[in-house]
Amino acid sequence: MKVKTKIGIAIAAVIVVLVVALGAVSNYLVDYAIGRSGDGGDREVSLEVEQTPEGVEAVIAANRATFEKQEEDFLAANPGEAVETTSDDGLTLRGVCYTHNEAVDSHRWAIALHGYRANHTGAQQLAAPYYEAGYNVLTPDLRACGDSEGNFVGMGWLDRKDVLRWIDYIIQRDPDAEIVIHGISMGAATTMMTAGEDTPDNVKAFVEDCGYTSVWDVFSSELQLRFGLPEFPILYTASGVAKLRAGYNFTEASALQQVAACEKPMLFIHGTADDFIPYEMMDILYNAKPGDNKAELTADGAGHGEAVYALGDAYWDAVFDFVAPYME
């Protein structure tokens, strides 16, 4: 056998091995990041952010304890109603609904959306204040989370279509419903991605708390922080694998593009010490939102998902002050 032929065979063999290895790694990352039983929620690294001042830590701890007690009291008095709907691709989606009795004539509704790999209980911290303010509240389990069916987490992109189904569910139940959608983390991304869709007039406003610009951006950051790997080539191939297996790729799942198509009001919230979703993403998203029916709320020293605890009652004052003008 000629030397050139041998070299060619060797090179081809190396390429095959690399392609197989890259495919295996990409499949692993898809399972890890968005597979239902993946370990993507077990995060041990963080972005380099300024340390939360001790005074802010104390406020967060105190408000967390207060709000958790309020949440316990709320759930004790309001066990909620198990509800379900069906996704466009045939999955059974489940959640819990907290509605007022007939003595409270309220057509105000809030859809409260939980974060990454959580379930509807992760949105109960939103449910209690909305309910106390006279809103009926729906807390869904997003697909592949909690009791909802699905093999892959939607990261907000697949979930946007599911939220449209939940909106239809509310309107069928209450044709005069006025709906606010409020999400935290992945729930915030879901909120923004839903906002870019053609939503019924019943949907009045959106509130996003510490959401990301796109799935690509957050996974690129996490790939570097968790594994010390660059986005090329692994994230590119993993995105292709996700498209084949989960039905979406990481570039199309863009909250930024969806926000740019949103004409309805939106409040953006973020903590400056967020070690998961960079605080800088809030301004990027805010600037992408057209119109002047928008506002920002910054929680100094708050980590990921801690804005509500860092700001306390001021958080809810800001939310209801923003939403109120748009409710009929």
Image (cartoon, helix red, strand yellow):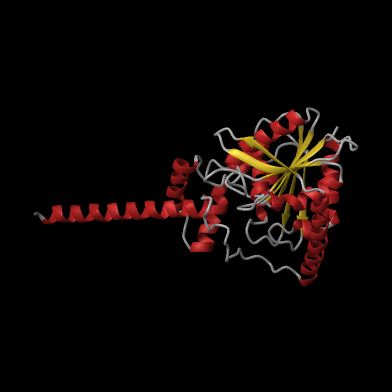
Name the residue at 18% across, 56% down.
7
Q: Position of residue 29 (x, y in %)?
A: 47, 54
Res 202 quadrant in image? top right
Tally of marks: 0
Res 300 quadrant in image? bottom right
Q: Where is residue 19 in the image (x, y as percent from the top left)?
A: 33, 51
In the displayed structure, 273 sits above or below 286; it is: below
Q: Where is residue 274 in the image (x, y as percent from the top left)?
A: 67, 60
Q: Where is residue 70 in the image (x, y as percent from the top left)?
A: 83, 56
Which sits in the foreground, 230 or 176?
Answer: 176
Which sits in the foreground, 55 or 243?
Answer: 243
In the displayed structure, 275 sits above or below 250; it is: below
Res 44 quadrant in image? bottom right
Left or right of 231? Residue 43 is right
Q: Is residue 161 visible?
A: yes
Left or right of 53? Residue 149 is left
Q: Which residue lies furthest to the bottom in this view?
A: 54
Quadrant containing the N terminus is bottom left
Name the residue at 67% across, 30% down.
198
Q: Residue furthest left?
A: 1
Q: Is residue 260 visible?
A: no
